Image: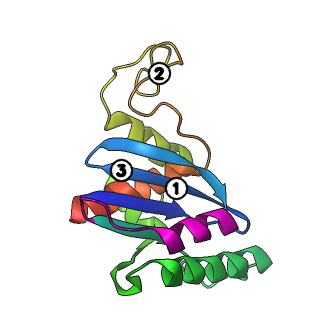
Amino acid sequence: MTILAIDPGTTKSGWAVVSGLTVTFSGVSGNDELLEYLGTYRKGGCETQIAIEMIASFGMPVGREVFETCVWIGRFVQAWHTPDDVKLVYRKDVKMYLCGTPRAKDANVRQAIIDRYPAAGGGKCPQIGVKAKPGPLFGLSTHAWPALGVALTVGAAA
């Protein structure tokens, strides 16, 4: 199964397309661009699951950015061709699956992702690699990492 995972933001969102452990595509796109893509997406030869990281309330005051992100999550869900099939994944679930604790930090989650991949590239971190000898995670940047964590979490539950 192919999973399109999104780490939503207020203006840009990270995304990753994953089949099993293979990261097919990833990146960070403007929300308008990603929304347009979701609205025009058509199923190919394989089933595609969409998963979006969802905002959770912890009882603390939040700012405008959190509410803007919630609006984008709703727009992404609505744009998908089968909105009822969208999986909303909470960050604590990603942390529990990848790190075994809800107290994990972003750096711990990133390292747990790296540890799941083979050291097939060059450089200091062969899972990522370098341009001359890329690893399986080569090209992932910023918000695409949390999106990959969402994809791996949903993939484990499938």
For the residue pair 92 and 14, the one nearer the viewer reads as 14
User: What residue is shown with label 1?
Assistant: 15
Instruction: Between label 2 and label 3, give the one nearer the viewer.
Output: 3
**Label 2 is placed on what type of residue?**
Gly
Residue 38 within the magenta-colored segment of the rendering: yes
Identify the residue at horizontal 72%, vertical 69% (top origin): 10
Q: Is residue 75 visible?
A: yes
User: What residue is shown with label 2?
Assistant: 129
Q: Which stretch did the figure color magenta? A: 31-47
Please report contact status of discs 2 and 1: CB closer than 8 Å, yes or no.
no
Identify the residue at horizontal 34%, vertical 59% (top origin): 3
Q: Position of residue 4 (x, y in %)?
A: 41, 60
The residue sitting at the right extreme is 64
Quarter of the image for the N terminus: give it.
Answer: bottom left
Dot 1: what SS?
Answer: strand
Q: Position of residue 101 (x, y in %)?
A: 38, 58
Identify the residue at horizontal 52%, vertical 18% (top origin): 130
Q: Tell me which numbered mark, 2 or 3, is placed earlier along the sequence.
A: 3
Label 3 packing within 10 angstroms: few (<14), some (14-19), many (20+): many
Position above or below: 96 against 36 = above
